[in-house]
């Protein structure tokens, strides 16, 4: 089997003893869309920076398109296209000028370059706006231009770092269909990082969940969800559980697994969610614990995340936000 | 090597195009040297009456000073757009492309140098109109402009490197404010060095701006000392080499921090 990307035990610590990666490993098969899913600050962007040769790991190794990112950086650079977080389009230049410069940088010239640029401008719906200054582009147009630039030299591996962050929901949906179409390109491997569960679920054929600088789970989105067996129960309690009575109440019940309490929310898993609800409610009531609401759901990636990290995705995001503040 | 040259030119075109689209910037760039020359020319007009002042009119004496100062100031701020590029991720995009780091710095240097040449020609012509006499003809004037370009190139590279280290506009502005004017006044740009306090003369000997001013003046005006011109040209070339090394090294430090 050939891997387009192999990361092995990557470790990276930033000045001030900030540990970004603590032994991160994963493999990406050629021609697939691979998602790195995790909250902000989990280490996804650091991973992309190392794999795209911008940054280097303290230890560990990685290859991209068969080349070592540390010792064969030049070869890696020729093989990859990168859409960095935010956007790195030159806003003082037109769309066409941006694409042309990007091609020139990769050694393209003359007719070849012009034809390829034209093709990409057409493909990403920028033909009419091509000669306008990019400062006047909408967020979606700017992002599409960036993707077009990343593809100019026909890379075999495309990195998309948070490709839809900061976009309106409708524009995000457009971007998703754009990415799905890219996935059908012959032989193109895509590494996508995202902190949107939906995005990973929709676009990635393989997924690695990243938490605190390491991969905690890996598989197809369907496989990861199927591993959870059964439905998720989310119970909103009237009061926070202070003395562990909630877990105690459910411990004796059969068929209820993975019970955890997060403030006023109780998470659990049951083979048949609908049948479990009355049983759970009764158990809680018998202990004098009031319930505000109950929700039963098919397993989602959020549940997968909860299972492997012990906290919900939203909570992890909120924590990350706290830290950066 | 040819690829790096080509990349440098692509980067130059990018910067020139961005500036070309700012008419206000072009206007100020063209008018600024005229203001300096006429303002300082009028302000210090009677300097020539000080006993011991050698040379003709003050405008003539001042021309190399204003020419070099204009080049130096423009180049000193060369790091500002670099910070903008850093913040926008444009530098990151180029760092993971096949572009050599030197080409990124060279693009800014060539763009700045073209500006210096245009400004210098304006100053030279204006001074000629107001009575300056270039004793060594076009050759002397070209050497004077070349020295200003060398100083600007080295200064741009320093400013570029500093921008990569500090990464904050405020810090870069403070640093440059701190350096630009003092270095200008610790030189023979406006005043004959034999007439200034000894300690200023001492510092001026080590001031690159003064190398460019004195050597340029010597090459274009009277009392030409070609040995002096050659040695100061050598100093400025060495400074440029060190500055280029510094700027390319600064990329490594930057990449370690991202």
Image (tube, coloured by chain):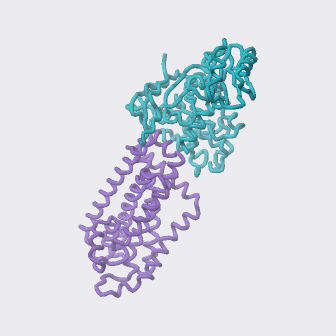
Q: Nearer the viewer, residue B175 or A121?
A: B175
Q: Quadrant of residue B28?
A: bottom right
| Whether residue B197 is situated above or below residue A34 in the rendered picture | below
Q: Quadrant of residue B99?
A: top left
Circle count = 0
Q: Quadrant of the C terminus of chain A?
A: top right
* Res B201 visible: yes
Q: Nearer the viewer, residue A307 or A162?
A: A307
Q: Nearer the viewer, residue A70 or B214?
A: A70
**Position of residue B231 measured from the top left corner of the image (x, y, whole percent):** 25, 64
Left or right: where B212 falls relative to B19: left
Q: Nearer the viewer, residue B70 or B227?
A: B70
Q: Quadrant of residue B236?
A: bottom left
* Res A184 visible: no
Left or right: where A275 falls relative to A160: right
Left or right: where A91 falls relative to B257: right
Left or right: where B108 falls relative to A164: left
Chain letter corresponding to the colour cyan? A
- In this structure image, what is the colour of chain B? purple
**Position of residue B106 measured from the top left corner of the image (x, y, whole percent):** 42, 51
**Position of residue A319 measured from the top left corner of the image (x, y, whole percent):** 57, 37
Q: Residue at x 55, y 25 (%)?
A: A208
| Whether residue B220 is situated above or below residue A229 in the rendered picture | below
Q: Residue furthest left?
A: B227
**Position of residue B61 measured from the top left corner of the image (x, y, whole percent):** 36, 78
């Amino acid at each position: 089997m050939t891997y387009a990307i192999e990361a092995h035990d990557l470790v990276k610590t930033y000045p001030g003893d900030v540990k970004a990666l603590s032994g991160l490993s994963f493999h990406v098969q050629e021609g697939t869309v691979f998602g790195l899913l995790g909250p902000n600050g989990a280490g996804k962007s650091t991973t992309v920076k190392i794999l795209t040769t911008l940054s280097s790991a303290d230890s560990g190794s990685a290859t991209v398109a068969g080349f070592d990112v540390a010792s064969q950086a030049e070869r890696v650079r020729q093989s990859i296209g990168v859409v960095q977080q935010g956007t790195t389009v030159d806003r003082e230049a037109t769309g066409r000028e941006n694409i042309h410069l990007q091609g020139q940088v990769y050694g393209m010239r003359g007719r070849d370059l012009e034809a390829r640029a034209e093709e990409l401008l057409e493909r990403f719906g920028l033909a009419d706006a091509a000669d306008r200054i990019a400062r006047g582009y909408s967020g979606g147009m700017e992002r599409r231009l960036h993707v077009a630039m990343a593809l100019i030299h026909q890379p075999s591996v495309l990195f998309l770092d948070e490709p839809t962050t900061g976009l309106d929901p409708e524009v995000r949906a457009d971007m998703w269909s754009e990415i799905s179409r890219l996935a059908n390109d012959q032989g193109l491997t895509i590494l996508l990082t995202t902190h949107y569960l939906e995005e990973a679920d929709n676009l990635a054929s393989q997924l690695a969940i990243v938490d605190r600088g390491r991969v905690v789970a890996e598989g197809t989105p369907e496989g990861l969800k199927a591993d959870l067996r059964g439905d998720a129960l989310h119970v909103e309690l009237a009061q926070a559980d202070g003395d562990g009575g909630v877990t105690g109440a459910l411990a004796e019940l059969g068929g209820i697994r993975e019970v955890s309490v997060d403030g006023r929310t109780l998470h659990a898993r049951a083979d048949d969610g609908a049948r479990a609800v009355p049983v759970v409610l009764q158990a809680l009531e018998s202990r004098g614990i009031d319930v505000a609401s109950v929700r039963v759901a098919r397993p989602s990636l959020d549940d997968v995340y909860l299972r492997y990290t012990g906290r919900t995705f939203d909570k992890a995001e909120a924590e990350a936000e706290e830290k950066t503040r | 090597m040819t690829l790096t040259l080509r990349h440098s030119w692509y980067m130059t075109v990018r910067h020139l195009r961005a500036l070309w689209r700012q008419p206000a910037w072009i206007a100020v760039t063209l008018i600024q040297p005229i203001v300096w020359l006429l303002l300082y020319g009028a302000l210090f007009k009677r300097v020539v009456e000080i006993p011991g002042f050698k040379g003709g009119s003050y405008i003539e004496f001042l021309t190399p000073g204003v020419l070099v100062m204009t080049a130096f100031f423009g180049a000193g701020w060369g790091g500002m757009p670099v910070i903008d590029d850093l913040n926008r991720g444009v530098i990151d995009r180029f760092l993971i492309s096949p572009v050599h780091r030197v080409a990124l710095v060279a693009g800014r240097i060539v763009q700045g140098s073209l500006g210096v040449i245009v400004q210098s020609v304006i100053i030279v012509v204006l001074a000629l109109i107001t009575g300056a006499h270039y004793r060594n003809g076009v050759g002397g004037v070209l050497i004077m402009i070349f020295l200003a370009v060398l100083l600007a190139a080295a200064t741009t590279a320093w400013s570029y490197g500093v921008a990569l280290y500090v990464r904050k506009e405020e810090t870069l502005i403070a640093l440059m404010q701190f350096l630009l004017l003092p270095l200008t006044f610790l030189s023979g740009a406006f005043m004959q060095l034999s007439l200034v306090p000894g300690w200023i003369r001492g510092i001026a000997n080590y001031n690159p701006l003064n190398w460019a001013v004195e050597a340029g003046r010597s090459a274009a005006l009277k009392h030409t000392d070609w040995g002096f011109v050659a040695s100061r040209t050598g100093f400025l070339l060495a400074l440029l080499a060190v500055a280029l090394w510094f700027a390319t090294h600064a990329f490594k430090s930057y990449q370690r921090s991202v």
